[in-house]
Image (cartoon, rainbow, N blue to C red):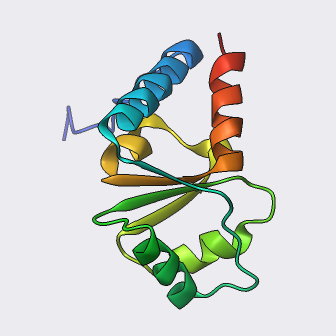
Amino acid sequence: MVFGPKPRDFSKKVNKETRRLAVEKVVSSRLISGDVITLDALSLEKPCTKTLLKVLDAVDAQGTVLLVVDGTNNRNVILSSRNIPHVEAVAVESVNSYQLLRNDKVVITENALSVLAQRLVEGK
């Protein structure tokens, strides 16, 4: 073909300030609507999906759930959530606005909430 199809990149660069502002707006709107559930602490001694499901049932997290944990010792929580189709676990350092909007409920630990607040304040 003379003028055959060529792959194109449709991605756009979004400024760091705009991304921070988007996360800030989404977090505030989710807090106002009551879709954020905070936990004092969440840690598992070993990766166990049953234990994580019991915790999520205890806090009444229905629908799709975003589990935001601080990145210190929560590898077992992230590993336990991989086998649950409606649960997505992410470290607080890498949470973005799309993940916060996509899920019905956001379950976040106290430490992760303070790290997220610090991250949003430092960007200003």
Which residue is at a point 42% across and 23% down the rendered structure image? 25
The quadrant where residue 42 appears:
bottom right
Which of the image's four quarters has the N terminus?
A: top left
Which residue is at a point 71% across and 71% down the rendered structure image? 43
Whether residue 9 is visible to the viewer of this picture, yes or no, is no
Q: Nearer the viewer, residue 54 or 26?
A: 54
Q: Position of residue 123 (x, y in %)?
A: 67, 16
Whether residue 117 is visible to the viewer of this picture, yes or no, is yes
Q: Position of residue 119 (x, y in %)?
A: 68, 28
Residue 78 placement, left or right of 9: right
Q: Nearer the viewer, residue 56 or 98?
A: 56
Which of the image's four quarters has the C terminus?
A: top right
Which residue is at a point 76% across and 83% down the rendered structure image? 45
Q: Position of residue 122 (x, y in %)?
A: 72, 18
Residue 124 placement, left or right of 58: right
Q: Decide: is 76 above or below 41.
A: below
Q: Position of residue 73 (x, y in %)?
A: 80, 65
The quadrant where residue 116 appears:
top right
Residue 82 placement, left or right of 119: left
Q: Residue furthest right?
A: 72
The count of marks equals 0
Residue 3 placement, left or right of 50: left
